[in-house]
Image (cartoon, rainbow, N blue to C red):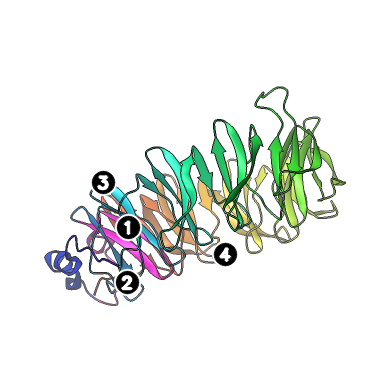
Amino acid sequence: MKRVRLISVMAVAVCLSLSAYGQGNSTPNYSEELMYEGSNNFNEGLGSLKSMGMWFYIDKDGKVPIDQAYKQVKAFSCGRAAVKQDGKWGYIDKEGIVVTDFVYDKAMNFEKDYAAVCQGGRWGLIDKSGRVVVPLQYDRVSMWSDGDVAIVEQDDKYGVFDLAAKTLKFNAYSHNLLSFNEGLASVADSRDLFKRKYGFIDKNGKVVIPFEYDDAKEFTEGLAAVKLGGKWGFIDKKGQQVIACKYESVRDFSNGLASVTQNGKAGLIDKTGKVVVPLQFDELGRPVGGYAYFWRNEKVGIIDIKGRVVVDAIYDALRMSKTGGPTAVKKGSKFGFVDMSGNVVVPIIFDAVQDFSEGFASVKLGNNCGIIDTKGQVLKVK
């Protein structure tokens, strides 16, 4: 496969004297050490930085594994990354080898070995070798599904494309066929907002739970949230109601627990409907790794799944870490990170941050960007 050199990354590094800053500073001088025009988080061992209008990849040791830079880049997934050259998108592997031609107007990250691409306003799917597996003829294509099918949309109709058989199974539903989860997908029987009802279909298009709900979410852990008579509850895959529709709002189950709201207050229930954390919060997020964010008096904090406050509700915004790393918080207009004891581990001084991923996070201070570790130290290019 061909290798295209756009600009020498190491030349950029020399121009910026990246090694000039001290090593091992306990308190970084962020205004000096954050020296890039842009930065993006690590995924599959590589992050990216922008310098002199070009993006390049960096590993966790600060080394530049691909001696090329691009106008735009996306994160690596399934060993591939979308990069932009001369106004078109293509894909490279982790050695910088081009695995598809630069011919796409839009290119999404790989999911489960497939990526959605767009050419001339029409979408399809390619595999990791660049081979087209779903023809570029649809208005929309997504891999938000169990992995063996793709959701396609054409002429205001949604359907399912079988990736193994490379055939369109059906293309009949007019609204809201977004994702299969645990083998089923919620769909609506009409585009009419006032008349439509929701039910569930399998991957062959067979209706397995009738169209009788006002709204419906996807199945998680064997249960799906459904709305009936203005209230939410949960059903199983046989369509049996296991938790009554009595809540004003609900979130999907996670590790056997779901956040529910009744009479304006939120708490946690288990899969039998038993309340395990009293409904006492203004809002409560879906549990992640044994914790959930909560709102009280217009401030946000974190509880554990027993309902104990571990991070006081003193922040204006908060994003729960999905990887177990420090949690991003916002006070006023500034961002930083706290641990699950509420200790500030990265100062709340940044203008923007991305969540920690693989032990690192992208941050921005003023117009300068960079990547830090969980101790707040800036990753240096070597």
Label 1 sits on what residue type? Ser
Instruction: Give the residue type at disc 4.
Output: Met
Q: CA distance from mark 3 to mark 1?
A: 21 Å
Q: Which mark is residue 87?
A: 3
- If you read the primary sequence from the N terminus, does the residue marked by circle 4 or circle 2 appear first? 2
What amino acid is labelled 3 in the image? Gly
CB within 8 Å, label 4 to label 2: no
Image location of residue 214, percent across then percent down = 75, 32
Which of the marked residues, 3 or 1, is nearer the chain's N terminus? 1
Residue 279 in view of the camera: no
Which residue is tagged 1? 39
Relative to 192, does residue 313 appear above or below in the rendering? below
Q: Sort mark 3 into few (<14), some (14-19) or many (20+) by Cα contacts within 10 Å.
A: few
Q: What residue is drawn where x is 61% and y is 38%?
A: 158
Tell whether label 1 touches label 3 (CB within 8 Å): no
Residue 320 can be seen, yes or no: yes
Q: Amino acid at mark 2?
A: Glu
In terms of secondary structure, where does tag 1 sit? strand
Range of magenta residues: 23-51
User: Which-is-in-front pick, marks 4 and 3?
Assistant: 3
Of labels 4 and 1, earlier in sequence is 1
Relative to 231, is 308 on the left or the right?
A: left
Q: Nearer the viewer, residue 42 or 376?
A: 42
Using the numbered discs, state the Cα–Cα distance from disc 4 to disc 3 in whole angstroms: 44 Å
Q: Which residue is disc 2 drawn over?
A: 95
Residue, disc 4:
340
**Residue in front for this viewpoint, 72 or 19:** 72
Query: Of label 2 and label 3, which has the lower sequence position?
Result: 3
Task: Please check the rendered image and state whether residue 279 is part of the magenta-colored stretch, yes or no.
Answer: no
* Residue located 44% across and 68% down the image: 44
